[in-house]
Image (cartoon, grey):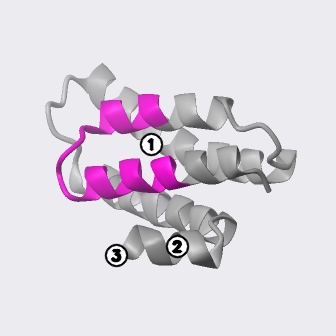
């Protein structure tokens, strides 16, 4: 796996963490993850599809909320969003090398 892709995975993890800490909006998270996913160079298509599936949950819940004119996601939607975020984190942690993971946590 390339160093370039490792950096993108770490950036994705950082974006997820920022969202969980309330430092990024759902809209920002959706956009940044989409951009980072699109620039990966050597990631297998099945991994991208799994990640895109979880990302789609974020996008769907956000779009439904906008369509309904809800300024805040309802609790059921937030539950789905948090589950998708946890699933994306798991996918990413499997990709980030052990050395990189240790650096990220410090």
Q: Is residue 74 above or below residue 25?
A: below
The residue identified by callout 3 is 106
| Residue 58, percent from left and from top | 44, 42
C-alpha gap between disc 1 and disc 3: 28 Å
Location of residue 29 (image quadrant): top left
- In the image, the segment drawn in magenta is 10-32
Disc assigned to residue 101: 2
Q: Secondary structure at mark 3?
A: loop
Main SS, magenta region, reads helix
How much space separates mark 1 and mark 2, taking CA atoms? 25 Å
Nearest the camera: 38 or 68? 38
Residue for badge 1: 58
- Which label number is shown at residue 15? none
Label 2 and label 3: CA atoms lie apart by 9 Å
Among the two numbered marks 2 and 3 on one chain, the one whose residue lies closer to the N terminus? 2
Q: Is residue 21 magenta?
A: yes
Q: Is residue 101 left or right of residue 105?
A: right
Residue at horizontal 44 percent and vertical 33 percent from the top: 32
Q: Quadrant of the N terminus?
A: bottom right
- Of circles 1 and 2, the one toward us is 2
- Identify the mark nearer the N-term, 1 or 2: 1
Q: Nearer the viewer, residue 101 or 35?
A: 101
Task: Tell me: 53 left or right of 101.
Answer: right
Q: Residue at x 55, y 32 (%)?
A: 34
Contact? badges 2 and 3 (CB < 8 Å): no
- Please identify the quadrant where the C terminus is shown: bottom left
Q: Is residue 78 left or right of residue 71?
A: right
**Where does the image place residue 9, in percent across and percent down from the top left?**
58, 52
Magenta span has 9? no
């Amino acid at each position: 796996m390339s160093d370039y892709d490792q950096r993108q995975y770490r950036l994705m993890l950082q974006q997820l963490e920022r969202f969980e800490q309330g430092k990024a909006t759902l809209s920002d998270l959706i956009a940044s993850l989409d951009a980072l996913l699109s620039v990966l160079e050597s990631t297998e298509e099945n991994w991208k599809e799994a990640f895109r599936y979880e990302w789609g949950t974020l996008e769907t819940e956000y779009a439904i909320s906008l369509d309904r004119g809800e300024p805040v996601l309802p609790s059921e939607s937030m539950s789905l969003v948090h589950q998708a975020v946890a699933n994306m984190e798991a996918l990413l942690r499997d990709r980030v090398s052990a050395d990189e993971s240790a650096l990220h946590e410090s």
